[in-house]
Image (cartoon, helix red, strand yellow):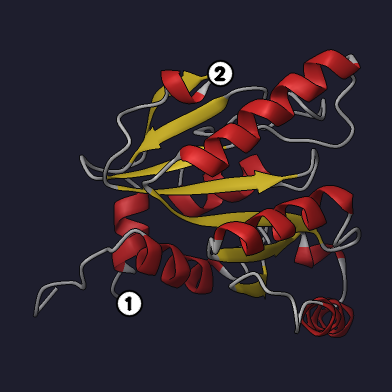
Amino acid sequence: MPQHPTQRLLHQARFLKSAQTVEQCPPDEGYEVAFAGRSNAGKSSAINRLTGQRSLARTSKTPGRTQLLNFFELDEERRLVDLPGYGYAKVDKQTRQQWQHHLDDYLARRACLAGLVLLMDIRHPLKDFDRLILDWSAKAGMPLHLLITKADKLKFGAAKSTLLQVRKTLKDHPAPLSAQLFSATAGTGCDEAWDRLGDWLRVPPPAEGN
């Protein structure tokens, strides 16, 4: 079976740099897709699965370890960004507010941001942080794709039911959004996610015969 063109591009991902502020980010050009999610939503595992790399994004059993904007280069024009995780992070209020400020700043000012992937644990969807990101996307008109992660933790029927419930809840939400089931462990939903990322990153179709 031929490799998905976006899969091929993502397999080239390499760590580019970390940034704490927008000023420290790479030049604001080309196409960028950012990944956001509460701590323990499975963000690092999803990035690793989609890029076919075991430890591109660090996974940790300590929630809230990602405190910087981490950039991964795909080619000269395209990047993925791992945004700070929120939720259970055992940090003081001032540090948490500082993270929030830098995230808001990045989302508001980054012109090359083509889309945002929001990851939610299938057992805990649509928490406060998720709704904050949804509301921000609506205000900014930023395309948003929900990866409902850890789908393997539920039986297929229950997982499908959760997806339908999330779609129903967000049916009239003003953000331009889509949603799917995903499992980094089982590989469920990779093709659908690659399709979405390919659209946003303007990945050219494979040449004839490839």
Which residue occupies the foreground of this view, 178 or 109?
109
Which residue occupies the foreground of this view, 129 or 137?
137
207 shown above or below 131: below
**Can you give x and y, in whole percent of width and height, for residue 110 in the image?**
44, 40
**Can you give x and y, in whole percent of width and height, for residue 70 in the image?**
51, 29
SS for tag 2? loop
Drawn side of residue 146 relative to residue 78, left or right: right
Mark nearer the N terminus (2 vs 1)? 1
Inter-mark Cα distance, 2 to 1: 41 Å
The residue to which callout 2 is attached is: 20
Residue at position x 52%, y 67% from top? 193
59 shown above or below 95: below
- Which quadrant would the N terminus be assigned to in this image? bottom left
SS for tag 1? loop
Residue at position x 79%, y 15% from top? 95
- Frontmost of labels 2 and 1 is 2
Looking at the image, the residue that sits furthest to the left is: 208
Residue at position x 51%, y 74% from top? 192
Which residue occupies the foreground of this view, 77 or 205?
77
Query: Residue 1 has which mark?
Result: 1
Residue at position x 48%, y 39% from top? 109
Query: Residue 40 has which mark?
Result: none
Amino acid type, label 1: Met
Judge the density around disc 1: few (<14), some (14-19), many (≥20) Cα neighbours within 10 Å: few
- Which quadrant would the C terminus be assigned to in this image? bottom left
Amino acid type, label 2: Gln
15 shown above or below 153: above
**Can you give x and y, in whole percent of width and height, for residue 60 in the image?**
73, 28
